[in-house]
Image (cartoon, rainbow, N blue to C red):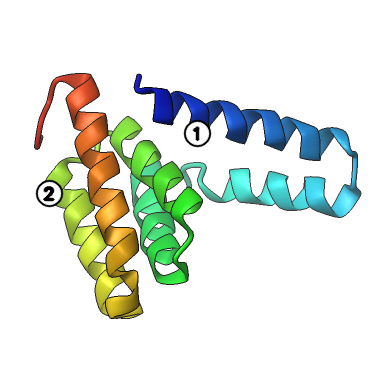
């Protein structure tokens, strides 16, 4: 795993723990709802991750985009599927999404390089 990905994951985990340890009822409820929203139901996990990725692109949240790209790959998404979701986010969000699309594509390349599946 690259240093950047290791740092991203470590920071996310550390700060999520810190936030949850503060024991704010509403924040903890929100975190629980967020986690539950991506569990399989009428839609499978990957479909929900695709929805999260597209929404995150439209909202231009690089941390969220990174999280969902990683989760999409973990759920078995192909690059072709992820790139189609990038396109949906771009179409809905417009040209202002392009810088985020660049970083998302770079992350996808990084994930593929780490797994030895360049462009798969």
**In the rendered view of the protein, which quadrant contains the C terminus?**
top left
Q: Which residue is mark 2?
A: 80
Left or right: residue 24 versus residue 71 is right
Query: Would residue 43 be seen by someone viewing this image from the given angle?
Result: no
Nearest the eye: 27 or 6: 6
Q: Position of residue 4 (x, y in %)?
A: 41, 30
Tell me which residue sits at (10%, 30%) in the image.
118
SS at circle 2:
helix
* Mark 2 Cα-neighbour bin, 10 Å: few <14, some 14–19, many ≥20: few
Q: Is residue 96 above or below residue 107?
A: below
- Observer-side mark, 1 or 2, equals 1
Q: Residue furthest left?
A: 119
Tell me which residue sits at (35%, 19%) in the image.
1
Q: Position of residue 26 (x, y in %)?
A: 85, 54
Q: Is residue 85 above or below residue 40?
A: below
Rendered image: mark on residue 25: none
Rendered image: mark on residue 8: 1
Q: Position of residue 108 (x, y in %)?
A: 24, 41
Tell me which residue sits at (78%, 33%) in the image.
18
Label 1 – label 2 distance at C-alpha: 24 Å
Q: Is residue 66 above or below residue 14?
A: below
Nearest the eye: 38 or 119: 119
Query: Would residue 87 be seen by someone viewing this image from the given angle?
Result: yes
| Residue 23 image-quadrant placement | top right
Q: How many marks?
A: 2
Tell me which residue sits at (37%, 37%) in the image.
70
């Amino acid at each position: 795993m690259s240093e950047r990905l290791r740092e991203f994951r470590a920071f996310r985990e550390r700060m999520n723990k810190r936030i949850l340890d503060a024991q704010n009822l509403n924040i903890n409820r929100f975190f629980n709802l967020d986690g539950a929203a991506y569990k399989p139901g009428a839609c499978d996990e990957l479909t929900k991750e695709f929805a999260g990725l597209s929404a995150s692109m439209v909202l231009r949240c690089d941390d969220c985009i990174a999280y969902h790209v990683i989760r999409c790959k973990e759920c078995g998404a192909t690059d072709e599927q992820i790139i189609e979701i990038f396109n949906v986010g771009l179409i809905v969000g417009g040209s202002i999404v392009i810088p985020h699309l660049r970083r998302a594509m770079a992350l996808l390349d990084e994930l593929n390089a780490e797994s030895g599946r360049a462009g798969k």
